[in-house]
Image (cartoon, helix red, strand yellow):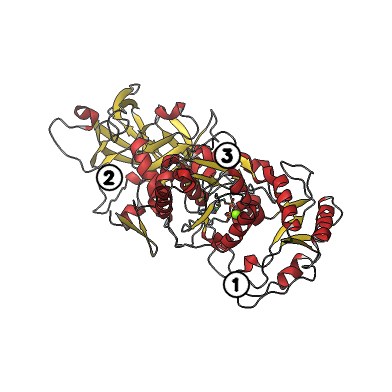
Amino acid sequence: MSVNNSGNETVVGKKNFIHQIIEEEINEGKNEGRVHTRFPPEPNGYLHIGHAKSICLNFGTAQKFNGKANLRFDDTNPSKEETEYVESIKKDVSWLGFSWGGTEFYASDYFDNLFEFAVKLIKEGKAYVDDQNAETISSQKGTPTRPGFESPHRSRTPEENLDLFLRMKAGEFNEGERVLRAKIDMASPNMHMRDPIIYRIMKAHHHRTGDKWCIYPMYDFAHGQSDYWEGITHSICTLEFEVHRPLYDWFIEQLMDGEYRPRQIEFARLNLTYTVMSKRKLLELVKDNYVNGWDDPRMPTISGLRRRGYTPESIRNFADKIGVTKVDGMIDVALLEHSVREDLNKRAQRVMGVLNPLKVVITNYPEDQVEMMSALNNPEDPEAGRRDVPFTRELYIERDDFMEDPPRKFFRMAPGREVRLRYAYYVTCDEVVKDENGEIIELHCSYDPETKGGKSADGRKVKATMHWVSASENVKAEIRLYDRLFNDEEPDGHKDVDFKDFLNPDSLKVLSNCYIEPFVKDAKALDSFQFERLGYFNLDPDTTPEKLVFNRTAPLRDNWSKQKGK
Ligand code: ATP
Ligand code: MG
């Protein structure tokens, strides 16, 4: 089966090209058949759905080949990193259903080894201390077609370099005064090979090593080496690292003492329509209060999706569906929404809830009577059973389900018309009660006692079945309706226009006067329900004993299936 997404063809169920590579290697006996991957987040923000793709790929690959996957924090930049992010990342990875064997790794675990390795490179004449600042160094880099200039400090002796490097480490110089560079090739066609900076001075407190270091390795100098020391066989990363691969391999070559070397394989990152995915931009939305925190249900973060009512299964299924390719593309966010609906449809408890209530009085129904109506918990799950829903003389229905002067195609409640109240009775609207402004405030109806359970004895048919909630036996709730956070398909794809200019002013709508059947009163935070005819909702952690708060995860209508004619 194949699905389309904005111009790109993603083939569902197709073999993942990385898995194909690994299968071939296993057949050749490479690494004795061992498969070991890692997920290497930088703890400088919360994880988003793009990271989820990478997590599913790395941990999923390890599972498929009976291998291992490490969680490794790439904490080489102490100025942007916080332990709050470390904790949130651990929580999100395990929530997605993956484990990393109990201990997580940190690039900072290797600061001593990396330092030793830098010293080795210096002694072998493969690294030197440059006194120029980063700007000057970058101005000497050249272009892809023109070689760069060699630094005047490039020919320092190993002794001189070692002395300077140790003094850098001892804190003798200020930030920016010295860097350590690998001595590779200023004329390489690959810009990353033109004597890249591998150590910089940063007088910053590190979340794990404290004030032990004032020099820190660059990401490129830490990443491959950490892979090597952990015995990683496949270092799976996004396409932008393809050009870093020769450097990755160069460092490993200087380090290798046997046959083993990790292999870097690149894949296309996930981009979603109507979504920004850069951590820097997500941080800006949080810091400047455009949203209510990292776990705001409108955010594409894993914590936001969780709070919104997404399940780990729905995210893993989504990752499977989009597949793994080498071509950058844009996935329709409707496919993500489709995945959560598909999963919740199978498992969500059904209840009735009214978001925009209109009172109905059943005038011929006894005043204090409460009748229990038997309702199906989930028609998709034969094991789910039934529950009782209280029916009383006064009820609420959805305001939209009534029209005083209905057009031809409107089949729901209207004056003189008989409709079915789901699981209850047939009722007919006899009278419309209005206030002094002409606003409808109440409907007076009569019921047919012979239609209990919503079935008529004489076989007469009605055109509509409506949901309802008892006006006396219910739970009051606040309901938060979400729309897309941005009203442009590619909010950060416009030159000269800030992505925030595309924020959707109607992305959150709060309804504070909603009624749900009593069943939900014992729900726990994040429990999901289908409100019949309305969509999927989950209980928000903001709920208090006085006020239940629900998020709408997704409406019932599925744009994806509709668009794709499925
Ligand atoms: P951002 O661009 O959002 O700041 P990042 O790449 O800097 O993300 P890292 O913490 O370094 O964030 O990412 C950890 C891992 O997740 C990396 O291996 C990276 O390739 C992968 N990753 C990040 N964004 C995506 C994405 N949109 N799709 C797939 N994988 C991603
Ligand atoms: Mg990164």
The residues tagged by marks 3 and 1 sit, at their Cα atoms, a distance apart of 39 Å
Residue closest to the far bottom: 146
In the depicted view, which residue is nearer to us: 174 or 45?
A: 174
Q: Earlier in the sequence, mark 1 or mark 2?
A: 1
Q: Which mark is residue 457?
A: none
As helix, strand or loop, the secondary structure at mark 1 comes to: loop
Task: Please say if 118 is above or below 229.
Answer: below
As helix, strand or loop, the secondary structure at mark 2 comes to: loop
Q: Residues within 10 Å of mark 2 (few under 14, many from 20)?
A: some
- Give the percent coordinates (x, y) of residue 58: 49, 46
Q: Residue at x 63, y 50 (%)?
A: 225
Q: Ligand 2 appears in which quadrant? A: bottom right
Task: Please say if 289 is above or below 471.
Answer: below
Q: Residue at x 57, y 39 (%)?
A: 90
Cβ of mark 3 under 8 A from ligand 1:
no
**Residue that numbered label 1 is attached to:** 189
- Give the percent coordinates (x, y) of residue 160: 83, 60
Q: Amino acid at mark 1?
A: Pro
Q: Amino acid at mark 3?
A: Lys
Quadrant of the image for the N terminus?
bottom left
Q: Are marks 1 and 2 in contact (CB under 8 Å)?
A: no
Q: Which mark is residue 412?
A: 2
Q: Residue at x 64, y 49 (%)?
A: 44
Q: Earlier in the sequence, mark 2 or mark 3?
A: 3
As helix, strand or loop, the secondary structure at mark 3 comes to: helix
Q: Which mark is residue 90?
A: 3
Q: Point out the frontmost of discs 2 and 3.
A: 3
In the image: residue 109, left or right of residue 238: right
The residues tagged by marks 2 and 3 sit, at their Cα atoms, a distance apart of 49 Å
In the depicted view, which residue is nearer to us: 462 or 171?
A: 171
